[in-house]
Amino acid sequence: MCLAVPGRVLDIEERDGTRMANVDFGGVVKEVCLEYLPDLQVGEYAIVHVGFALQRLDEESAKQTLELFATLGLLQEEFGDPWEMAAEVGETLPSAGEEARK
Amino acid sequence: MKYIDEFQDPDLARRLLDDIHSTVTRPWALMEVCGGQTHTIIRHGIDQLLPDQVELIHGPGCPVCVTPLEVIDKALEIASRPGVIFCSFGDMLRVPGTGRDLFQVRSAGGDVRVVYSPLDALRIAQQNPDREVVFFGIGFETTAPPNAMTVYQARKLGIPNFSLLVSHVRVPPAIEAIMQSPTCRVQGFLAAGHVCSVMGVGEYPELAERFRVPIVVTGFEPLDILEGVRRTVAQLERGEHTVDNAYPRAVRPEGNPAARAMLEDVFEVTDRAWRGIGVIPDSGWRLSPKYREYDAEHRFSVDGIQTREPAACRSGEVLQGLLKPHECEAFGTLCTPRTPLGATMVSSEGACAAYYLYRRLDLTPAPREATPVV
């Protein structure tokens, strides 16, 4: 939950008086609130936590982090189906553990 | 250096490690505050790459783990009520309350929904005006601003059927409590990077000065952790105790002023109980009087809940640094992520989960004696 993931702003619109954006996290697109970074522009990167952009990030750092998170399976953890993960947690964790030890 | 090839930049990792090895002249105990950092450390074996003199003590920085059992039980009670849609982040689903969890409440017919953002819960409230929609608002300074904004929006848009079950916690009072413990061995802190992305570093110089302890703002990736350790050890070896920012790409000194202003408007500081640790003064937030009508505890009568901690679970000691996860008798046998006795085994940031995931076959005793920190 405290994982904050860098993403790139694809487009911006106002909804219910709130500045919202579609943000691309290495292929997964989510709606993100920009109220805490009101001058963030299309094409820029930001650190996003639970649907809120919290701080700007330079493109190179953002891409490196996204690549690392994808390799470690953290993007799946953050954006995957939580019910499925909660149900299967007993089955998936040991194999992930084995994987990490290789 | 058996894991080092897995690092994003193994050459840089090697240089940082060489620097740390050549700087250290005596033993130092550092605490990483954030559970996300604990997972990075265990996953990449960073604690095993460091010199023997540098010990990392895992801090109480997992928001799911420190949420008191009483609050979990209140969530389960509210989620079980007819007419309620209970919304939560996914990592709360399997956190055990007294005898059950949210996953089981849903199986028994409760309308429990997982959302990615608290604003999703607000939208569910808009779409279901005849139902009460409650969002489970836990977390540190990183998660509090999104939840604050959601309550602000609920009021602005006049959405009466939304409320927040709030149990937010703050890092600086926890650092203070740790340092005030007579048995504290912590000599330096790796401060949680994304908490500082929001709050900046302004709360730390006073703590660093008062307790003569270096506080180094640190990120979450393996190289970030190594850099945080390198800078903390360098300060300790020089006899310094300042606040240093080793994560400048994501942390500005002032943090995020808009988010901090919203926190001040929507929340007020309060004493807060931490699971396994007890009440820490001024260590939490609750809704300010202006927003009290959006407080789920006021809207639903959930007082008088009887909580019961499982006797075999020693997560309280793990959260205080008294015990390493694999030193618990239930670890990996009675207690697994599928049948967790405590939140530290099931949370994606829990210390027990980190050991189970990445070191479950390596059940050798910890090399050093664990010492209480709170």
Image (cartoon, rainbow, N blue to C red):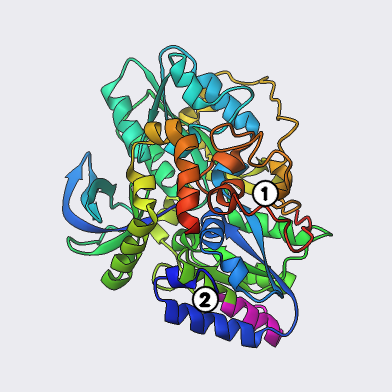
Image: A102 above or below B80? below
Q: Is B364 placed left or right of B124 in the picture?
A: right
Q: Residue B28 at what x, y percent from top left? A: 72, 74
* Residue at figure coordinates x 53%, y 49% from the top left: B357
Residue B340 sits in quarter: top right
Q: Residue B55 at what x, y percent from top left? A: 69, 68
Circle 2 crowding by C-alpha within 10 Å: few under 14, some 14–19, many from 20: many
Circle 1 crowding by C-alpha within 10 Å: few under 14, some 14–19, many from 20: many
Residue B243 on the magenta segment: yes
Q: Residue B299 at what x, y percent from top left? A: 50, 22
Stretch in magenta: B230-245
Amino acid at circle 1: Pro
Return the residue at label 2: B227
Q: Can residue B122 be seen?
A: yes
Image: B156 above or below B43? above
Q: Is B327 placed left or right of B205 in the picture?
A: right
* Residue at figure coordinates x 44%, y 30% from the top left: A87
Return the residue at label 1: B325
The one of B206 and A53 positioned closer to us in this rendering: A53
Q: Residue B21 at what x, y percent from top left? A: 62, 83
Q: Is B312 placed left or right of B105 in the picture?
A: right
